[in-house]
Image (cartoon, rainbow, N blue to C red):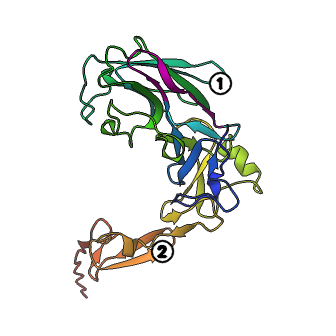
């Protein structure tokens, strides 16, 4: 399953795709595309494994997905691999098997799953992912088939999740999986670029260059490809031809001028000092010196 989206056509922050472009691919559902941050927030089903009180596995679902060949990567700064349970071991790898990691969560009593839980291995475990991942698959196992904790925990869950949206209180140890439209999902952040080219390479082909008027080519922190951003003094969607519009600082800013009159200009604003004073008006105005000229014979 692969993700096929076109972020350059999205608005600053929207929850739907461009007409004619699917907002869902396989079990990934794109919910929000941010032009300013260069991210896609998507929903992804969680993996799980459940056992009965005798230690026999009753249910199991492993997760795998790929972002395809497009300019998409999983955000290493926003996402964390998370495991929930008291006898839960989960591991993850990419499709190329060039990366692997695991997380183990154990507890002998019904620990508090409050938001104060540090998620450091008791009821909850989290670990980071490396930069540049385009695929991931993960599944769960157990050490003792939950027989020692069966009074309060019979299922374990594993998922990649946006750390900003994750709340451990949403994941009680008594939770059991749901299915179909009610199945549990987690928000995942995907980073995107226009193309895996440098700004110089992109500008050399103006017919395909994505940045519109009053926009500039920029490099993202992920270290590959380019994005567009509105020049200083402009705002809007830098991927549309006239998407970056002038900001009227005189209306938007609170008290933009220290004194007297604010004048909006394209991409900036000017402040005029009152008569008898001088300066740029933005940082302040000073009174002019009085020079007396005495004329003699």
Q: From this viewpoint, which residue is outermost toward the bottom?
A: 297
Q: From this viewpoint, which residue is outermost toward the front?
A: 54
Residue 61 magenta-drawn? yes
Residue drawn at x 41%, y 21% as measured from the top left: 52
Residue 33 magenta-drawn? no
175 and 81: which one is in front? 175
Determine whether, in the image, residue 56 is placed left or right of residue 226.
left
Determine whether, in the image, residue 13 is placed left or right of residue 285.
right
Determine whether, in the image, residue 284 is placed left or right of residue 68.
left
- Whether residue 77 is visible, yes or no, is no
* Badge nearest the viewer, 2 or 1: 1
Q: What secondary structure prevails in the magenta region?
A: strand
- Provide the residue span drawn in magenta: 48-67
When the figure is inspected, residue 73 is found, relative to residue 257, above or below; the finding is above
Q: Position of residue 42 (x, y in %)?
A: 53, 45
Residue at which label 1 appears: 95
Residue drawn at x 25%, y 88% as measured from the top left: 297
Q: Position of residue 291 (x, y in %)?
A: 23, 78
When the figure is inspected, residue 147 is found, relative to residue 261, above or below; the finding is above
Residue at which label 2 appears: 265
Q: Earlier in the sequence, mark 2 or mark 1?
A: 1
Q: Position of residue 70 (x, y in %)?
A: 69, 41
Q: Position of residue 205 (x, y in %)?
A: 77, 51
- Whether residue 80 is visible, yes or no, is yes
Badge 1 density bin: few <14, some 14–19, many ≥20, Cα 10 Å = some
Q: Quadrant of residue 174?
A: top left
Label tally: 2
Q: Quadrant of residue 269?
A: bottom left
SS at badge 1 = loop
């Amino acid at each position: 399953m692969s993700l096929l989206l076109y972020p350059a056509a999205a608005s600053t922050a929207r929850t739907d795709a461009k007409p004619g472009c699917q907002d869902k691919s396989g079990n990934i559902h794109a919910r929000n595309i941010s032009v300013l941050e260069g991210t896609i927030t998507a929903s992804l089903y969680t993996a799980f494994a459940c056992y009965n009180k005798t230690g026999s596995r009753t249910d199991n679902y492993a997760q795998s997905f790929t972002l395809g060949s497009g300019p998409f990567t999983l955000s290493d700064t926003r996402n964390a691999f998370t495991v929930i349970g008291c006898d839960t071991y989960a591991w993850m790898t990419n499709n190329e098997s060039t990366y692997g990691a695991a997380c183990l969560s154990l507890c002998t009593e019904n620990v508090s799953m409050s938001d104060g839980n540090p998620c450091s291995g008791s009821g909850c475990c989290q670990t980071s992912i490396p930069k540049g991942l385009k695929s991931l698959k993960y599944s769960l196992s157990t050490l003792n088939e939950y027989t020692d904790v069966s009074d309060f925990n019979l299922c374990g869950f594993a998922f990649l999740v946006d750390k900003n949206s994750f709340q451990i209180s949403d994941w009680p140890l008594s939770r059991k999986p749901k299915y179909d439209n009610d199945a549990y999902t987690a928000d995942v952040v995907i980073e995107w670029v226009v193309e895996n080219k440098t700004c110089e390479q992109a500008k050399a082909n103006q017919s395909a260059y994505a940045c519109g008027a009053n926009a500039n080519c920029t490099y993202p922190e992920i270290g590959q490809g380019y994005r567009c951003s509105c020049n200083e003094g402009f705002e809007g969607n830098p991927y549309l031809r006239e998407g970056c519009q002038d900001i009227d600082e005189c209306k938007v800013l609170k008290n933009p001028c220290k004194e007297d009159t604010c004048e909006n200009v394209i991409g900036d604003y000017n402040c005029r000092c009152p008569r008898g004073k001088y300066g740029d008006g933005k940082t302040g105005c000073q009174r002019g010196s009085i020079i007396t000229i005495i004329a003699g014979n």
